[in-house]
């Protein structure tokens, strides 16, 4: 039965269509009919995603003295996942329809389907709820016995816990310190949905931040670190340009937190399809290091030189979905208005679609055009200005300048608006004849300003 369409569905449809049309994101394995829960990033999607990664790495690693980057292997010894609890407990409740064989997550069915055990697709009878482990299982090497079993990691976190001792032995950091990692994670979601929101292959940006264990039950030093990360996570959301009014903190109550967590805050976002999780922040205590010590028989304790004592550190974990960040940024930036609207084939005015991306994440910051593409003198001058801006902005650490001479000027503005380019620079005949500078157009207001060529880079630097 088709679900009732909501305004959110329409927005998601428009965003997905823009992403495909303009080369941000495509369905995975599209020419073969796709593979559910996988997405391929095109040139603009990669640029957007890389800009987000760079901002994250700068804030959480490069700008701090207490963070160590790692890049652990995706395939890990199977004991890792026994120790972490994923083999035993990383499961969702699954129900299958006896008639059409469609599978559903039992906790996501509507109340009618749950109460009547009726399939939402064909009305057939739903079977008993089973526990479905979400890890992708594989075999390492030529053998297919139990000893060769491994899993595609379902989170990047464990790659950091198993490297804790390596970092301590090679860098001798003083507590508190953190390990940070960006990388792929894989979950065999029963029902991947909402574009990048719930995928089977996605990227995470995670930190495991190690602190001294509380001295007694009243010692709440960990709360300060936890609160500091709440602030830093919000600051990162501002870095990528997310509207703070759309982000909400949810204190996850006892009984609903993951088995390892003593406190969790979910940062929820107002998606077009409802308010749902964007990021998580958890106090994992000493659960992981203790488990890995027990399972590996390797001592993962830490010797504190100041207090002359040995202990297992506790851990605070800020966890960010990278693809969810891309999606939140796109949803927040997607706008339609009537500016410069042209009549379409049916005589109706077409809406302008534009992405109000923050310059910090926009794939292109500046696009340079000649007013007309068939006037060689304009094209030559525009190329010169393009090369000059590109080179000088790169020296200041700003990349993302493009040259565009496809179609007429109106079409170029529309294209750049749709991909979120904040500024367009046009070279016209006045630029050549009267040395009257260039036109700079602002994506959001459509306002155009004349700027002297010699002042162009300084002008753009102030805006970006
Ligand atoms: N290490 C802790 C951990 O993995 P999680 O809440 O399961 O916690 C962390 O995942 C973040 O990863 C989520 O807040 C979300 O941003 C992202 N995430 C989780 N499952 C995802 C999926 N199926 N598709 C896309 N992103 C996902």
Image: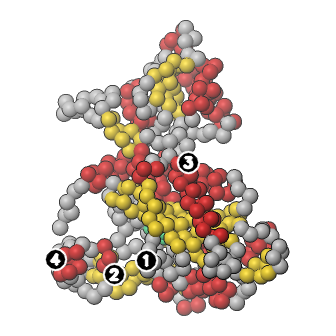
Disc number placed over residue 256 in the picture, else none: 1
- Kind of element beneath mark 1: loop
Judging by the rendered image, the residue that carries numbered circle 4 is 123
- Asked if disc 4 and disc 2 are in contact, CB closer than 8 Å, the reply is no
- Kind of element beneath mark 2: strand
- Kind of element beneath mark 4: loop
Q: Is mark 2 within 8 Å of ligand 1?
A: no
Q: Nearer the viewer, mark 3 or mark 2?
A: 3
- Kind of element beneath mark 3: helix
Disc number placed over residue 94 in the picture, else none: 2
From this view, report whether residue 342 is shown above or below residue 16: above
Q: CA distance from mark 3 to mark 4?
A: 47 Å
Q: Nearer the viewer, residue 236 or 113?
A: 236
Toward which corner of the image does residue 130 lie, by quadrant?
bottom left
Spot the residue most to the front.
Answer: 218
Image quadrant where one finds the N terminus: bottom left
Image point (61%, 31%), residue name: 461
From this view, report whether residue 198 is shown above or below residue 111: above
Image quadrant where one finds the C terminus: top right
Label 1 or label 3, whichever comes before in sequence order: 3
Label 3 or label 4, whichever comes before in sequence order: 4
Q: Nearer the viewer, mark 1 or mark 4?
A: 1
Label 3 or label 2, whichever comes before in sequence order: 2
């Amino acid at each position: 039965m088709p679900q009732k369409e909501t305004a959110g569905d329409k927005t998601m449809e428009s965003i997905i269509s823009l992403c495909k049309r303009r080369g941000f994101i495509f369905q995975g394995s599209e020419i073969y009919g796709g593979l559910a829960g996988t997405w391929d990033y095109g040139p603009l999607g990669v640029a957007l995603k890389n800009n987000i990664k760079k901002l994250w790495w700068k804030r959480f690693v490069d700008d701090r003295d207490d963070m160590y980057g790692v890049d652990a292997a995706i395939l890990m010894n199977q004991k890792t996942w026994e120790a972490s609890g994923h083999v035993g407990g990383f499961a969702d409740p699954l129900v299958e329809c006896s008639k059409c064989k469609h599978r559903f997550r039992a906790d996501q069915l509507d109340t009618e389907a749950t109460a009547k055990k009726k399939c939402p697709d064909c009305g057939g009878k739903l079977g008993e709820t089973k526990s479905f482990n979400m890890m992708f299982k594989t075999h390492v090497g030529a053998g297919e016995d139990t000893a060769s079993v491994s899993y595609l990691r379902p989170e990047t976190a464990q790659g950091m816990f198993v490297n804790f001792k390596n970092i301590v032995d090679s860098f001798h950091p003083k507590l508190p310190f953190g390990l940070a990692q960006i990388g792929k994670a894989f979950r065999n979601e029963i029902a991947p949905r909402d574009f990048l929101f719930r995928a089977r292959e996605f990227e995470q940006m995670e930190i495991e931040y190690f602190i001294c264990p509380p001295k007694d039950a009243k010692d709440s030093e960990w709360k300060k670190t936890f609160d500091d990360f709440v602030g830093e996570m919000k600051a990162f959301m501002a870095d990528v340009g997310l509207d703070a009014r759309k982000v909400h903190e949810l204190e996850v109550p006892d009984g609903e937190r993951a088995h390892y967590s003593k406190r969790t805050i979910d940062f929820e976002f107002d998606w077009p399809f409802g308010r749902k999780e964007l990021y998580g922040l958890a106090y994992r205590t000493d659960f992981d290091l203790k488990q890995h010590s027990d399972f590996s028989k390797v001592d993962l304790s830490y010797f504190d030189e100041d207090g002359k004592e040995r202990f297992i550190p506790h851990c605070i974990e800020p966890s960010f979905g990278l693809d969810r960040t891309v999606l939140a940024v796109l949803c927040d930036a997607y706008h339609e208005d009537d500016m410069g609207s042209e009549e379409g084939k049916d005589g109706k005015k077409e809406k302008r679609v534009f992405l109000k991306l923050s310059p910090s994440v926009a794939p292109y910051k500046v696009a340079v055009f000649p007013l007309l593409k068939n006037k060689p003198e304009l094209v030559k001058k525009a190329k010169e200005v393009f090369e000059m801006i590109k080179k000088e902005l790169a020296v200041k650490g700003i990349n993302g300048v493009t040259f565009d001479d496809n179609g007429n000027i109106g079409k170029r503005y529309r294209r750049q608006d749709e991909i979120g380019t904040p500024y367009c620079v046009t070279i016209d005949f006045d630029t050549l004849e009267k040395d009257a500078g260039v036109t700079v157009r602002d994506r959001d207001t459509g306002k155009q300003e004349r700027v002297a060529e010699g002042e162009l880079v300084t002008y753009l630097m102030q805006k970006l």
